[in-house]
Image: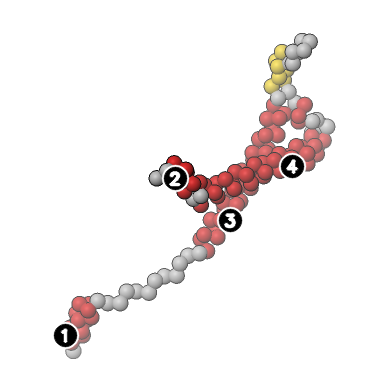
Amino acid sequence: MSLVKEFKEFAMRGNVVDLAVAVVIGGAFGKIVASFVSDILMPPLGLLLGGMNFEDLLITIKRGVGDIAPVTINYGMFVQNIVDFLIIAFAIFMIIKAINSAKKKEVPAPEAPEAPTKDQELLTEIRDLLKK
């Protein structure tokens, strides 16, 4: 089998295509959540906490000199990223929960009992005759 043909079979499997679609949608969803957190959620939260901007929360380790930028720990951005993660994790949890509950509803109907074999029928007849 040629390498190109083998790769084509691999790439066209359902799982690989589904994974590619999930990665693209996940990336777009991540951008939406990041925008929601930084542009909609954090400004009112910062206002409630005394007008602070979370992007400006940082600790300066070394001040910048001339063209050299200061060395900082940006813990405000870290807080925003944690909120992003929590929202994305909760959304994924809810999606998986919905999928699992949909799977539970699809319980197959119980199968009818198997018909007795000829040996079982014969033994049943003999039992019935002995009872009489």
Q: How many marks?
A: 4
Q: Which residue is the site of mark 4?
A: 36
Residue at coordinates 37% horizontally, 74% vertically from top-left?
A: 112
Q: Residues within 10 Å of mark 2 (few under 14, many from 20)?
A: few
Distance in Å between CA atoms under marks 2 and 4: 43 Å
Q: Which residue is the site of mark 2?
A: 6
Q: Amino acid at mark 3?
A: Ala
Residue at coordinates 18% horizontally, 87% vertically from top-left?
A: 129
Q: Earlier in the sequence, mark 4 or mark 3?
A: 4
Distance in Å between CA atoms under marks 4 and 3: 23 Å
**Dot 1 lies on which element?**
helix
Q: Earlier in the sequence, mark 1 or mark 3?
A: 3
Residue at coordinates 80% horizontally, 37% vertically from top-left?
A: 43
Q: Which residue is the site of mark 1?
A: 130
Residue 98: which numbered mark, if any? 3
In the picture, the quarter occupied by the C terminus is bottom left
Q: Earlier in the sequence, mark 2 or mark 4?
A: 2
Q: Amino acid at mark 4?
A: Phe
Q: Amino acid at mark 2?
A: Glu
